[in-house]
Image (spheres, grey):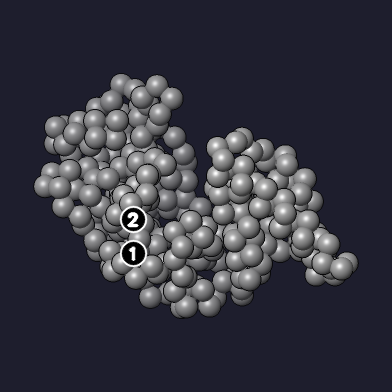
Amino acid sequence: NALKVLNRLKQAGFDAYLVGGGVRDLLLGHEPKDFDIATNATPEEVRNVFRNCRLIGRRFRLAHVFFGREIVEVATFRGSNTEVGSDAQVTENGMILRDNVYGSITEDALRRDFTVNALYYNIADFSLVDYAGGLVDIEQGRLRLIGDDPVARYREDPVRMLRAVRFACKLGFIIDPDCAAPIRDLAPLLAEISPARLFDETLKLFHSGYALPAFEKLRHHDLFAQLFPETDACLAREDHAFPITFVSRGLNNTDQRILEGKPVAPAFLFAVLL
């Protein structure tokens, strides 16, 4: 279905690339969970090409192309959000609230979070396009933010700190020391993120088969206290190590169920943590 979207966009005269986690996972020999596409077509132009398409989002306007229950997400290349009069909103802290500024593939690549997520597969000539050194980082097992200022990148979207932990656990990569260093000081910025988005990120962290290592890494970077302050306070005054053992066993149980293909429920996860 992703190939159908890529080919249809190409036939309609647009540039279309497979991008992000799908490309990264294929290079690592993993089976991608989903495929994302980046194009120079605007969301409205994508909708004109596909009848089975719906536009979603205000913060990031995206096109979803439906194939039964499967969705292929199509994003227009993002440009710089610093232009005067552009359709972008940024808080005083540097967090991006709204971003519908379109640009070139080069700008789009440099706007992404981690180098390993900024690889593009070009349907036109079957080439791999890498503007940020992501291929080298994949070969070296390193998770690195794009750009020279990790603090600014985390301020743009504090959820990137949680994503750093998630990708490090999922891929078995190390977080680049320059990218890991500011996380503890910036962890309180997660308070500015909506509960709904934090809930989604928490499920991705704990319902992907590496809940226990994610929990340990979140605590190491002082991120766990931002998500579960009462649990963190309880763990700090351990009673014969009971709370940490209880949580560890609950998370390990979740990982085992996922490994065995059994269902898992957010209710159990939150019951353990709370």
Residue at 46% x, 70% y: name it.
174
Judged left or right of residue 228, residue 237 is right
Of 164 and 81, nearer the camera is 164
Instruction: Sort mark 2 into few (<14), some (14-19) or many (20+) by Cα contacts within 10 Å.
Output: few
Q: Please tell me which residue is depicted at 24% across the width and 35% down the height of the picture.
A: 3
Where does the image place residue 224, in percent across and percent down from the top left? 67, 62
Q: Residue furthest right?
A: 239
Q: Local crowd at mark 1 within 10 Å, few (<14), some, or many (≥20)?
A: many
Q: Position of residue 32 (x, y in %)?
A: 38, 44
Secondary structure, mark 2, is loop
Above or below for 116 versus 273: below
Work out which residue is located at the far front of the displayed protein and give it.
Answer: 260
- Res 68 → quadrant: top left
Q: Is residue 156 visible?
A: no
Of tags 2 and 1, which is closer to the observer? Answer: 2
Expressed as whole percent of the image width and height from the top left, the position of residue 125 reads: 11, 47
Quick check: 129 left or right of 65?
left
- Which residue is the site of mark 2? 28
- The CA span between labels 2 and 1 is 8 Å
Q: Does the CB distance between marks 2 and 1 fall below 8 Å? A: yes
Residue in view at x 67 percent, y 38 percent: 265
Q: Where, by quadrant of the figure, is residue 61 drawn?
A: top left
Mark 2 and mark 1 lie on one chain; the one further toward the N terminus is 2
Rendered location of residue 30, percent (x, y):
37, 49
Comparing 255 with 15, the one in front is 255
Label 1 residue SS:
helix
Instruction: Decide which of 208, 223 is in the foreground and name it.
Output: 208
The residue wearing badge 1 is 138
Image quarter where the N terminus lies is top left
Q: Which mark is residue 219?
A: none
Q: Is residue 258 above or below residue 241?
A: above
